[in-house]
Image (cartoon, rainbow, N blue to C red):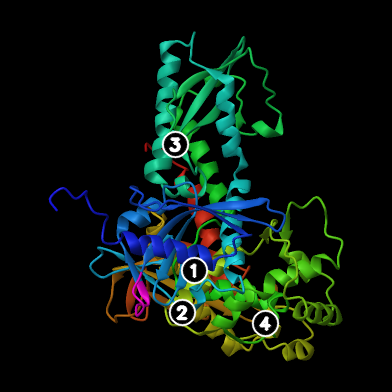
Amino acid sequence: MKNKPSPYAQTDFQEDESIHIFKSSIDRKRIKTDIKSRDKYPNFDGYIEVVDDDQCSIGKFELQVKTIKNSTGTFYCKPELINYSEITTLPILLILVKIDQKKTYWKHLIRENAILTEEEKSYKFIITDEDLIQENKNYIFDWITILNDYQQRILNYKSIESMIVFNEFTTPPINTNKEQIEFYQLFVDQLNNGIERTFPFLKKYKFTDVWKLGVAIQKYNNGTSFGIFAIPNGKTDLLIKEINTKKRINPFDNNHRFLQFFSSIEKESNYLSLSNRFLKNYLLDVIKNRAFFFKNLDLATECVFSFVQQYHFILGIKKSNKYDLRKIKHRLSFYFPIWISVALDTIEYPPHIPHIDISLFTLNRTEEINKKTRNIVKNRINYKLKDSLLFHSEDTNLFHVQQSLNLLINNNINEISSPFPAPNYTLIKKNKGFYPWELYTKSDIKKTIESFYSKIFYIINDFCIDNNFPAEFLIKIKNSYKFIVVAQINKNLNQPGGIEITLFHVETLQETNPCGDIIFLYDLDFIKKNYSYEWFESGFELGGNKYKLNSWQSSIDIGIFHRKPYYDFLYKYLESQASEFFKSERIF
């Protein structure tokens, strides 16, 4: 017939069927769906909301539902979808459905979970049975962990919400002179340019859902004070306003901690120093909260291994030098939340703490108490979970642990062990001490030093490049630049553990005998006894090569013996470099 109406798309049935299978595979009591079929939006199929057993909301996801072939173990998506995940204000779940098998898989749609193809035209997600939505409801806890991470970031930066609320107390400027307007224009431009161009990761980790920052002025007889407010995405507003004196606002109210008061702003003649002061604080805030996740196998191994070593009893796993990753992943999703719920009923948890700090469960727990808890967990598979609360620890980001597990498994790594030699605790009794010297042989200390410093500088550079840090944060360790790692290992030293490490960053002036980027020495006497530092800085010979000192630092706090040496060194470096970066005035 010539007058037939326009047909539906060939994929219309598949889309409806995939959504139906997904809905039938989830726990409808805990997961509330709002999914649109035949939608016209390219990156959006609807929402799902996770609720607790009392039907109170825990959090919401955006959804993207896709049909995949029965035989496939991968899914490819365009870069635009990944880019969209970084600007939307909610976390996104990618739902993948095999229609004939009636199986539904899920992935958290973020760049860190995907692999960029060689042609760089698409991203690949690897699908395993661990991603299957099953009746045991492991997926619910995984989703809650993602939501908790998102909410924890919001809690860490609650001032952003206050900055948006502050806009209610402002009005368009009335009596501000031209010079002041120009000053604040330059200040606001510098502030927003620094966030958007120089440190773009601040948009993701601190200023989520913020379009621009603005400044609100309040005049007094002896000067001017001001506050920073935030304009959310999707709203238009002036960037320079005045505080509305008709509305009462208490600057000492905890809900308005964002206000920055100066008794005489006229003395702040340099807009650069003022705006850079704010940017430095914003940057250090994100660094100190360790908000970043970085796709690096060494960091992922360290993250998972240190977590299991410390909390193995909460996972029902015996402490060991090696761990099976799939067992950890299963225990983290299933055993861990039940254990926490049972343990909370056996202790008086501090009521003033708004989240479940898992580090508190390491205190005063005997093996007898742990054994009793394990037995209860085994018999309470359907135990009511206290999952509406945030799981959090001062030194552990549970979301990062999950991401690290996924990264390792996606790279076909099934087992992890410590990257460094294990401590020998029998040496403590022999040496009657508690320093690293008493826990390791001299040979093991050397192995640890060389294993750590042969990687850490490259990890830092890759991290800074991946997160779009300014070039000044990169370490020069290519071409003519090298590191000389000098370690003194002597139990008679007046240092903790009898170990001191000095890092010399040098530039090669003449290389007769080619060597690697990192040189290890175990004696500082060749400098201390025979040469002055003036000579060392002007040029010195080592192994037939001539070098010039660029910088050096000495440390007796040996981070290689911390639980997370890579992470600790990385973030200490970032803090130090951030302070160094803002020593000079910069225009962004």
Which of the 4 image quarters holds residue 473?
bottom left
Q: Residue under circle 2?
A: 520
Q: Residues within 10 Å of mark 3 (few under 14, many from 20)?
A: some
In space, the residues marked 1 and 2 are separated at their CA atoms by: 10 Å
Q: Residues within 10 Å of mark 2 (few under 14, many from 20)?
A: some
Element at label 4 = helix
Upstream in sequence: badge 2 or badge 3: 3
Q: Main secondary structure of the magenta part?
A: loop
- Residue at x 42% of width, y 14% of height: 179
Query: The magenta stretch spans which residues?
Result: 68-74
Q: Are marks 4 and 1 in contact (CB under 8 Å)?
A: no
Q: Residue under circle 3?
A: 233
Q: Are marks 2 and 3 in contact (CB under 8 Å)?
A: no
Q: Residue under circle 4?
A: 437
**Residue 492 x/y as whole percent:** 69, 80
Upstream in sequence: badge 1 or badge 2: 1
* Amino acid residing under circle 4: Trp
Q: Is residue 323 above or below residue 158?
A: below
Numbered label attached to residue 503: 1
Upstream in sequence: badge 3 or badge 1: 3
* Amino acid residing under circle 2: Phe
Element at label 3 = loop
Element at label 2 = strand
* Amino acid residing under circle 1: Leu
Upstream in sequence: badge 4 or badge 2: 4
Which of the 4 image quarters holds residue 147?
bottom right
For the view shown, which residue lies furthest in the left direction? 2
- Residue at x 47% of width, y 43% of height: 583
Marks 2 and 3: which is nearer the front? 3
